[in-house]
Image: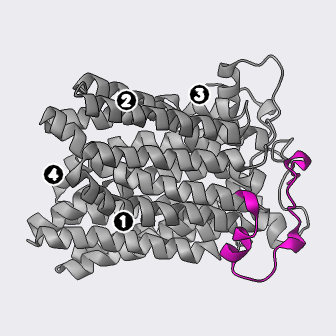
Amino acid sequence: MVRFPSARINLRSSSVKKKLALVQLAKHREPRLLVTGQTVSQFGDGVALVALTLLVLDTTHSVSKLAWFSAARMAPLVVFLLVGGAIVDRFSRRILLLISDCVRAVLTAVLVVLIATGHLKFFELIVFAVLFGTFDAVFMPAMTALTPEIVPEELLPAMNAVRPLSNNLMGSMIGPAVGGLIAAVSTSWAIGVDCGTFLVSASALFLMKPTPTPRRTPGSSMLSEIKEGVRYVRQTRWLRTGLLAAGIGNAVLFSSMSVLIPFFLIHTLHESKVVVGFTFAVSGLAAVVGALIASNMKTPRRRIRVMWCIWTLASLSALVIAFATHYWEVLCFPIIAEPMLVLGNVIWESMMQTEVPRDLLGRASSVDWFVSLALAPMGIVLAGFLATAWGVRTYFFVMSLVAAAPGVWIILSRKINEIDQDRVKGSAVAAPSPATFPRDENPSSQNLGI
């Protein structure tokens, strides 16, 4: 892939020696700043996860209003993701991340002031959630698109593994634990901590070197650029089929794990709430281990087949629940699935960052996020309905096979795996130029607008 010379970063292959990838990654200034800022920010997200939940309950004393608050944050994220992807492909990704962090810092600061002055009502909480979700819609694709601009291609797997590592370690384990302690004393202090972490992340982005503005067609409208991004995904075989298959797996299996497994433990195996908490902790720890392994993993030559072998095994590991009679057997599912999901995700994201043209990466990433997030709520509702009708054991047995079937098809498909043909043969040309579309899949050859 042709790299931006204006990024002023040495991306030579020879700079990556045979050492731990995380050690090599730490030697590069820009990735080091980004990872540091994001790790601190993930800690703040974990603190806020507990603090905001307690704040809504303290303010409204209503579970239904807590659900409305969560929906208010998720809805704009899903609705504006495609728009956010188009914005990401128009402006400097670093500047957009900086703006997003600063705005979210201001929003949390305003929330602290409203709490301190006693003026916080449910309406203000809903407005906060909507605005926060809107800027999340820009942040997610911008992060994916910025990464290949500042990280050597050989270290993309390490960089893409650091993010789930910090997310699970800081955002899902340490952050919530500290957030609960702080919120027990003062909810406003806990949210103030989250505000401070956004400022730390923004400072790290500010200290980074300027990154180039993506190339775009002069005079093109936002709508036409969104259509171009969706059209590219639809006409790029490995992306189209991968998103469809992953969307099915997320909808019918992985999005419902956090709901059906606790229900199964308590109501079927008659375990205690302590066991449920222990299961979540083990799941988070397994994901951390997977991220550590992925951080030093070289991108395989047969990326599609390796990735989908990993994800298919993760889907099939759910079969254990169909026959589980003890909680330790249930633990086998997250212990196997969580690291494999992380490993597959690292290959997928690294592949997007090397195969998708740089000027389309933001929009392609937004389509990826859109499909994943839009199907998750529907999958949870479907899982609840079918698990009630069939039973949890039967649901996991059937849906494990349903989720694995598309992966088997992709593994066996020659056409889908053609993207790796040159890599397998050892060709020097392993990826297309970012200025062009993949060979034989040029979106301009067909008119498939949305």
- Please rate how many residues cluster around mark 4, counting C-alpha atoms within 10 Å: few if below 14, some from 14 to 19, many from 20: few
Residue closest to the eye, 117 or 279:
117
Between the C-alphas of marks 4 and 2, the distance is 38 Å
168 is higher (above) or lower (below) than 191: below
Q: Are marks 3 and 4 in contact (CB under 8 Å)?
A: no
Residue at 34% over, 42% down: 377
The residue where tag 1 is placed is: 173
Residue 347 seen anywhere in this rendered image of the structure: yes
Residue range highlighted in magenta: 1-30
* Residue type of the residue flagged with mark 4: Ala
The residue where tag 4 is placed is: 389
* Mark 1 element type: helix
- Which of discs 3 and 4 lies nearer the camera? The answer is 3
Say whether disc 2 or disc 1 marks the residue closer to the N-terminus: 2
Residue 282 point in image, percent of width and height: 33, 74
Between the C-alphas of marks 3 and 4, the distance is 39 Å
- Which of discs 1 and 3 lies nearer the camera? The answer is 1
Q: Is residue 115 magenta?
A: no
Say whether disc 4 or disc 1 marks the residue closer to the N-terminus: 1
The residue where tag 2 is placed is: 128
Say whether disc 2 or disc 3 marks the residue closer to the N-terminus: 3
Residue 427 point in image, percent of width and height: 89, 68
Say whether disc 3 or disc 4 marks the residue closer to the N-terminus: 3
Residue closest to the eye, 186 or 336:
186
